[in-house]
Amino acid sequence: MKKLSKIYIGIVLAFLYVPIFVLIVFSFNETKSRSVFSGFTLDWYEKLFHNKIIISSLINTVIIAVLASVISTILGTFAAIGINSMRKVPKAVVMNVTNMPIINPEIVTGVSLMLLFVFFAARMNIEFGFVTLLIAHITFDVPYVILNIMPKFKQMDPHLYEAAQDLGCSPTKAFRKVILPEIMPGVISGFLMAFTYSLDDFVISYFTSGSTSQTLPITIYSMTRRKVSPEINALSTIIFLVVVVVLIVKNVIENRAAKRNASYKGGVRE
Amino acid sequence: MKQLKIFSVPYLVWMLVFILVPLIMVAYFAFRTADGEWTIQNISEVGQYANIFVRSIWLALIATVICLVVAYPLAYALSRMEKHKQSTMLLIVMLPMWMNFLLRTYAWMTLLGNNGIINNLLGMIGLGPYKLINTSGAVVLGMVYNYLPFMILPLYSVMEKIDKSVIEAASDLGCNSKKVITRVVVPLSLPGITSGITMVFVPAISTFIISRMLGGGSNLLIGDLIEMQFLGNSYNPHLGAAISLVLMVIILLIMTIMNQFSPDDQVLI
């Protein structure tokens, strides 16, 4: 049974990884062939680094992802604090609307924002581009921030904030010293989630970007639509390596924190 | 804490303008003509594309079922591994999902192509070439490949919580391994199954990338239809909005059905 499950996991992993490894192998292929490996070269990487469209869309993607995730983290953190202190019914209404961009298919969110921007563009001289893209990204990022923070309030004693004020804290200080530290893990995971969703988003960006401001996924899409170029393979290889490194670092940090927590609890507290 | 309510005002404004109003606009556009009159013609026109709707639902359904069948044993095997191995294994399973899904789909384009590797390898042993790409099978494969982790994750997270002693108790009390699965594991993992189904079905039914990259021109899905009305040659946002509205209703129905099977306190999105 044990062996059988190991074989099964192996097969599924092969299914998940073989396509990616094939992409990586053919990024070093001398010719443009996608099935015959004829010789080793790094040419496609060189071409990639000299491809102005890719580089500029990469920079654009990072700028949008940073701005959108920072703004949505601030907006979402304050929102979560406010929503948490609402009465039951308004709270439920707001949370249901907040869930909509997550439940709705991406294409519907993209199309709905596009309709809004078209409407405004016709009346207020706004162009599709950086601003519409940023607004769209913030809109689909904020719900993830809020959903990451809300559970932290459930774990928190609601009287702590009042207690801090009774003991002489000003409301701002009580907020800074009591509420913020309690919800911080949620804020951070919400920020990271928003950032990665922004980096990776294609569908919503596709409908809200116009032709002037492109993100990397949009550039990748137009590359796959045109003729075959192993530059895409080279790009995939680099992205894959970045993902592997980031996830390993994340895992190591988390494991260390878990160990530290365990020894702290085991040694000092209990 | 009541005075803290005011903090949510900026977001409430944002939510109103950029979440609620756009969705209302979709509904509004769906019932208006280009000349600005009320109509139900757009909605009735959606009926012409019934075959595309049926195809989308069918392909998404097949992909969802395959994902469930493939992911269920995997998630179970993962959840029964030693604890310290689990997190590493989960990382390895989820890692491909962190690659942009356009690149993942592109990978299959190169594998399935008429001169692609699969046909080349088959050619070496004297088979084929087969028409692999631009078929509905390729679209389903693309859906399964891209959305399989969405099924694995919720399944794993409920199964991981199933106490080992519950399973042992069942077998001590005379259940064979088949019965342990059907009477203990499946009922306890039901919330994971329902949320996995929605998490795979919703993106699968609304995709336009997978069908475009792997399905060629002959496997249009609802997503392609919507995209064509907004950014394609047949520009008609009114019809596009009507199709989006119908798609939303279909998804809402599916989710309501799924929530029926889920215990009340564990309704997952």
Image (spheres, coloured by chain):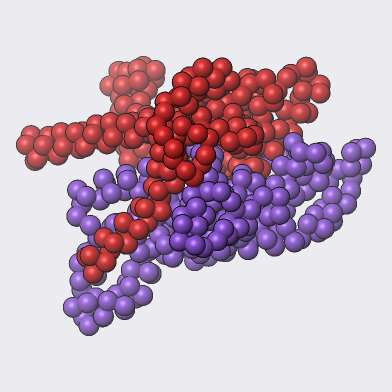
Chain colours: A red, B purple
Considering depth in this image, is A265 or A134 the residue closer to the camera? A134
Q: Position of residue B37 (x, y in %)?
A: 92, 41
Residue B50 sits above or below residue B239 on the image: below
Q: Quadrant of residue A252?
A: top left
Furthest residue toward left: A267
Taking the spot 75% from the left edge, 61% from the top edge, the residue there is B51
Taking the spot 50% from the left edge, 34% from the top edge, the residue there is A31
Taking the spot 19% from the left edge, 55% from the top edge, the residue there is B82
Considering depth in this image, is A40 or A224 the residue closer to the camera? A40
Considering depth in this image, is A190 or A235 the residue closer to the camera? A235
Considering depth in this image, is B55 or A197 the residue closer to the camera? B55
Question: How many numbered marks have been drawn onto this rendered protein structure?
Answer: 0
Q: Quadrant of residue A181?
A: top left
Q: Position of residue A125 (x, y in %)?
A: 78, 17
- Name the side, left or right, on which B263 lies relative to B158: right
Residue B137 sits above or below residue A46 on the image: below
Q: Quadrant of residue B36?
A: top right
Quadrant of the image containing the N terminus of chain B: top left
- Name the side, left or right, on which A184 lies relative to B228: left
- Name the side, left or right, on which B71 lies relative to B184: right
Q: Position of residue B79 (x, y in %)?
A: 28, 58
Q: Would you say residue A236 is visible in this rendering? A: no
